């Protein structure tokens, strides 16, 4: 079997293994968040940062939830990294955003953060701060979910079917799941352009 066919077959296997109840839990928490006027903060690094920016757009426009990400302001983010360090950059950004109980952190990460192995410590510190203030923590992550899965109120872990393609599959399915969320009847508050053209 060539690589293309193998990759597609792996994606089908993952799709069949993803936990629908975990996704429905995300829907319920996000519905409550909007009803209570809470804010949604997306966190990610690398591909997850790109997802965070795209998701901010979709959740603001389609689900009409107030949403933000630290990676949308490169000037502030790099100033925090330069002055305070990478590990505390997201946590300090959340402090500056006055994160509070009633708000939600949503993580896009392959590993979910792992302080012991010094991987994505900025996520670990941000999630620690979120738990301190009583914010809800959610995420879509890969592998075993790392620190995100340990502390989350709801977390979807993308199943690993091939250790050699954990990152591309996790990042692909993160996009699939957040698009499912914003188009879910409980969350969709505004029609999308191409769906409204008849």
Image (spheres, rainbow, N blue to C red):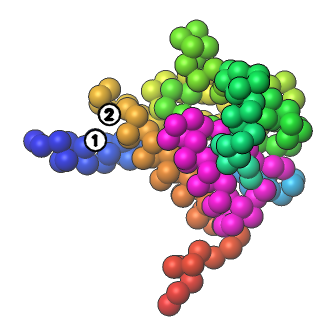
Quadrant of the rendered structure where residue 168 is?
A: top left
Q: Nearer the viewer, residue 3 or 187?
A: 3
Near mark 2 (Cα within 10 A), the count class, few <14, some 14-19 or many ≥20, is few
* Residue under pointer 1: 10
Which segment is the magenta one?
A: 38-66
Residue found at x 32% / y 33%: 165
Residue found at x 69% / y 66%: 61
| Camera sees residue 111 | yes
Decide: is 148 above or below 75: above
Residue found at x 66% / y 67%: 62
Decide: is 53 above or below 143: below
Contact between labelled residues 2 and 1, with CB atoms less than 8 Å apart: yes
Disc sitting over residue 165 in the figure: 2
Cα distance between the residues tagged 1 and 2: 9 Å
Decide: is 14 above or below 133: below
Locate the N terminus and report the quarter of the image it occupies. Answer: top left
Q: Position of residue 155 (x, y in %)?
A: 60, 36
Is 58 within the magenta? yes
Decide: is 173 above or below 155: below
């Amino acid at each position: 079997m060539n690589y293309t066919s193998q990759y597609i077959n792996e994606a089908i296997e993952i799709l069949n293994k993803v936990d629908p109840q975990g996704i429905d839990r995300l829907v319920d928490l996000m519905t409550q968040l909007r009803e209570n006027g809470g804010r949604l903060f997306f966190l990610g690094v690398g591909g997850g940062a790109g997802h965070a920016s795209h998701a901010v757009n979709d959740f603001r426009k389609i689900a009409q939830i107030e949403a933000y990400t630290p990676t949308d302001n490169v000037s502030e983010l790099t100033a925090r990294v330069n002055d305070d360090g990478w590990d505390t950059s997201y946590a300090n950004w959340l402090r500056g955003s006055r994160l509070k109980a009633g708000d939600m952190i949503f993580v896009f990460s392959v590993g979910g953060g792992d302080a012991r192995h010094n991987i994505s410590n900025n996520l670990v510190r941000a999630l620690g701060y979120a738990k301190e203030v009583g914010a809800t923590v959610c995420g879509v992550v890969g592998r075993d979910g790392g620190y995100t899965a340990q502390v989350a109120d709801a977390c979807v872990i993308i199943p690993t079917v091939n250790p050699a393609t954990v990152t591309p599959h996790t990042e692909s399915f993160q996009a699939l799941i957040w698009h499912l969320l914003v188009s879910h009847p409980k969350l969709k508050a505004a029609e999308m352009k191409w769906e409204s053209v008849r």
